Image (spheres, helix red, strand yellow):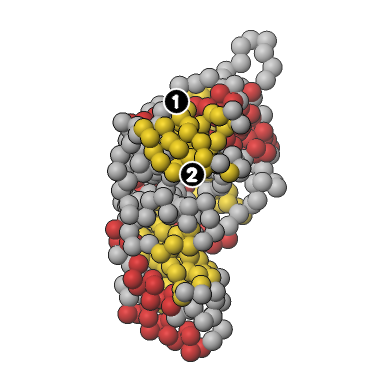
Amino acid sequence: MIEEVVIDHVGVAGDGVAKTKHGAVYVPFALPHEVANIAVENGHGTIIALKKSSPERVEAKCRHFEACGGCALQHWADDPYQMWKRSLVVEALEGRKITTDVEPVIPCEPHTRRRMILTARVTPKGQIVGFNRYQSHDVIAIEECPVSRPELVDELAAIRSLAALLANYAKEIRINVTLAENGIDVALEGCKINDEKLRQRLVEEGLKQSFIRLTADGEIIIEKERPELHFGSATVELAAGGFLQATKEAEEFMASLVMQGLKKAKNAADLFSGAGTFTFRMAEKMKVHAVENDDSALKSLDRAYRQSVGLKTVTYEKRDLFRRPLLPRELEAFDGLVFDPPRAGAEEQAREIAKMNIPHVVAVSCNPVTMSRDLSILVEGGYTIEKLVPIDQFLWSPHVEAVALLKKRKPKPGWRL
């Protein structure tokens, strides 16, 4: 069915939303107040003809835009795009009846993302190395990526050569290409190497390229140097495929907010610590207890701490905080706490924190919906949101990072929290 529609607004997934007599229709790559003829199917529309274009529409930065699924909003001017990103946080908070000031979005520049996650897939027409097609499981080959660091994009030809060696052994592999402080790290997933001839060919190919390390399902194929990250004054080894913040610039800004929120703390907890993104910066000023469930991240944290000088005491434990959140008797030692969970948030842990009188808490999240849920638990438990900053770490996508600084309210006489 072809229908002429007016786009009302951009929804949470980055699609234009048109209100029709049949209900809302979601139209990718459409902007507010645009008029378009669209083909409608199951509540989703495809633009057939753009009858009236928005003055906010700009030329996309990438030749693969609209085909590649990595970006949804390259065609939107910076100011309205950033206001929309902020609105994702505001509306999630309003959904939980939280009223607080939300600061303007901190922008991240193009060409700053330091990891590309590629797929190499064998098809009837040959192997394709690239990103998923928009709203599809198909893979499209890419030649450029204005989101990613140029050093990563420059390695695409080398990655294709590497993937070609595996085409007869694995129909599909995932390739994590990361820019560490000292070079490029390549981690292959889905291709356990049991063939010695293949292993030798991978070694030879890896040595020809500029990668400092190549791993396959965690096994080191070549390692010219251990990939390193700098977290404050500490140098941390990056585990193969290990977590890191998408951009170094966003990480540093987030860390500065964490330190601002915990500046009065002397003994703090870092929950979902990873390899120590915040831990080591905190340890320059205070004692820190880091809690993380990933073995490789904790090994990196431990090694880095042992090799560091001038830090306060850092302790750590392996723990699944979803199943076993820290309990009040364990939390009572801390006068500061930061938690940075995955997208699912930290509901059970937030409930335990809310019972406590930890003076300063910082919440970090890449999901406004689960963050708002967790913040509502803390607010109900007597915390006040002092500052909330969205950070556009995931450029031109519908995802946004946010950092909230909270302070425990002092109960009035006669109150019982």
Total marks in image? 2
Residue that numbered label 2 is attached to: 46
In whole angstroms, how far apart are the C-alphas of marks 2 and 1? Answer: 34 Å
Q: Dot 1 lies on which element?
A: loop
Q: Front-most of 49 and 336?
A: 49
- Return the residue found at the far front: 2
The amino acid marked with disc number 1 is Val
Across and down, in percent, residue 80 comes to 36, 30
Q: Is residue 53 above or below residue 281?
A: above
Q: Front-most of 310 and 319?
A: 319
Across and down, in percent, residue 156 comes to 35, 67
Residues at discs 2 and 1 in contact (Cβ within 8 Å): no
Please tell me the numbered disc located at residue 88: none
Q: How packed is label 2: few (under 14 Cα within 10 Å), some, or many (20 or more)?
A: some
Residue at the (53%, 19%) spot, across then down: 99
Residue at the (33%, 36%) spot, across then down: 57
Residue that numbered label 1 is attached to: 102
- Return the residue found at the far bottom: 197
Q: Does any portion of residue 66 appear in the rendered image?
A: yes
